[in-house]
Image: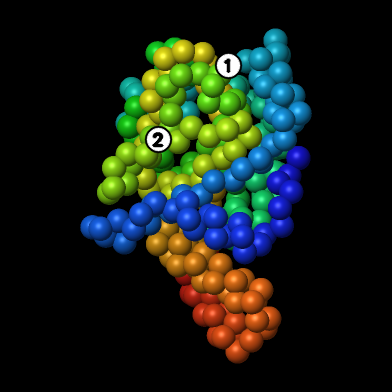
Amino acid sequence: MTHGHSWQVAEATVARMQLAPVPLITFASTMRFQLDALLDPQGLDNLLEDLLSAQAEWRPGQESAGWHARGVKHNRQLDRGSPLHQRLAARVIATLEAHPLLQAAALPVRIHGLLFSRCGPGEGYGRHVDNAFMAGGRADVSFTLFLQDPSAYSGGGLMLESPAGEEEVRLAAGSAIVYPSTLLHRVAPVTGGERFVAVGWIQSRVRDADQRELLFDLDTARRQLFQREGKSEAFDLISRSYSNLLRRWGD
Ligand code: NI
């Protein structure tokens, strides 16, 4: 199921409020945003059932890690070559592609590398940065879609680093966190239960996170203006800046 909201000002404002504080040292964007209720409860139940079914084959996560991350990656992943993986991955990607906030904030060219990961007690993923290039494309933006409620496991938080420190992300089942692939991050060891997530990457029209953030600000501002005063002179000027910057920075 796709997210029910249309792309609207309220959503943009909420997304802006969820941004990390502006870093003091550099203007290196740590912009992250949350997509809530990406999958409905029934869809989630079906997906988890499929992941726990006998036909699901799980492989060591090290197989898909960069050489520098192999030593710190301790999880299992659904076999990417299996028909089950292909069916479930296609569903998650289609849902993400249809999301208006993701479109506006991440400017996706393609969503790729999707994998389903499970971590039991003692498993996790130590501090690393995601590879810049993968088989499916460039990784500009990373996402984690949580498939189980935080009460189903302990530990296992996604820890995102920024100049302000480390932030723990543990979202409700069906919600996703989307963040720049430039960030160092880790998955804290699971201490009880089992953590199921889907993770993947986005090649963006705009590779630079600072530029993406500027464009998202402009897009949000022009939508707010449009809602308030329609297609005014100010709206046209901001729209022009938005389109011309996208033309300049996009590929
Ligand atoms: Ni990672």
Q: Quadrant of residue 2?
A: top right
Using a 10 Å C-alpha cutoff, classify the residue at mark 2 as few (fewer than 14 neighbours), some (14 to 19) or many (20 or more).
some
Q: What is the tally of numbered marks visible in this picture?
A: 2
Say which label, 2 or 1, has the lower sequence index: 1
Q: Quarter of the image containing the N terminus?
A: top right
Q: Circles 2 and 1: CB distance less than 8 Å?
A: no
Q: Element at badge 2?
A: strand
**Residue indicated by mark 1:** 58
Which of the pair 64/124 is nearer the observer? 124
Q: CA distance from mark 2 to mark 1?
A: 26 Å
User: Residue 168 — which label?
Assistant: 2
Q: For the point 54% across and 75% down, which residue is it?
A: 242
Is 90 positioned to the left or the right of 16 in the image? right
- The local secondary structure at tag 1 comes to strand
Tell which residue pokes out farthest to the bottom in this image.
233
- Say if 132 sits above or below 109 in the image: above
Circle 2 or circle 1, nearest the eye:
2
Of 251 and 46, nearer the camera is 46
Q: Is residue 62 visible?
A: no
Q: Quadrant of residue 112?
A: top right
Q: Position of residue 210 (x, y in %)?
A: 40, 62
Residue placed furthest toward the top:
54
Locate residue 28, reporting x and y percent: 33, 57
Ligand 1 contact, mark 1 (Cβ < 8 Å): no
Three-letter code, disc 2 = Glu
The residue under the point 60% across, 53% down is 102
User: Amino acid under label 1?
Assistant: Trp
